[in-house]
Image: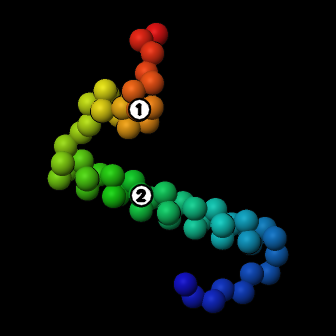
Amino acid sequence: MPNIKLTSDLDLQDFDRTQATLRLMNELAKGRKSVEKKGWLTLGAVEKNLFGDNISDE
């Protein structure tokens, strides 16, 4: 990461927001590549990953 001199809290907030945006875009790109390579998960598979076997049928 290059050394950037920030002149105010607003600059720091903008920098943090930009860094968060870049991380989000990177993770979205990873997800897209995964889908292109492996295909989509079913809703049941996602629920099992998130909640394990503790899923109610509401």
Residue 1: where, in percent of width, then height? Answer: 55, 84
Instruction: Tell whether 25 sits left or right of 19.
Output: left
Q: Count the marks: how many?
A: 2
Give the vertical position of 18 relative to 54 (above or below).
Answer: below
> What is the number of the mark on residue 52?
1
Residue pictured at 63% horizontal, 89% vertical: 3
State the residue at coordinates (43%, 36%).
50
Farthest residue to the front: give it.
53
Percent position (x, y) of residue 4? 66, 86
Tell me the residue that label 2 is attached to.
Answer: 27
Mark 1 residue element? loop
Which residue is drawn at the image coordinates 25% and 53% (left, top)?
Answer: 34
Q: Amino acid at mark 2?
A: Glu
Distance of label 1 from label 2 (alpha carbons): 23 Å
Q: Secondary structure at mark 2?
A: helix
**Residue lying furthest bottom in this view?**
3
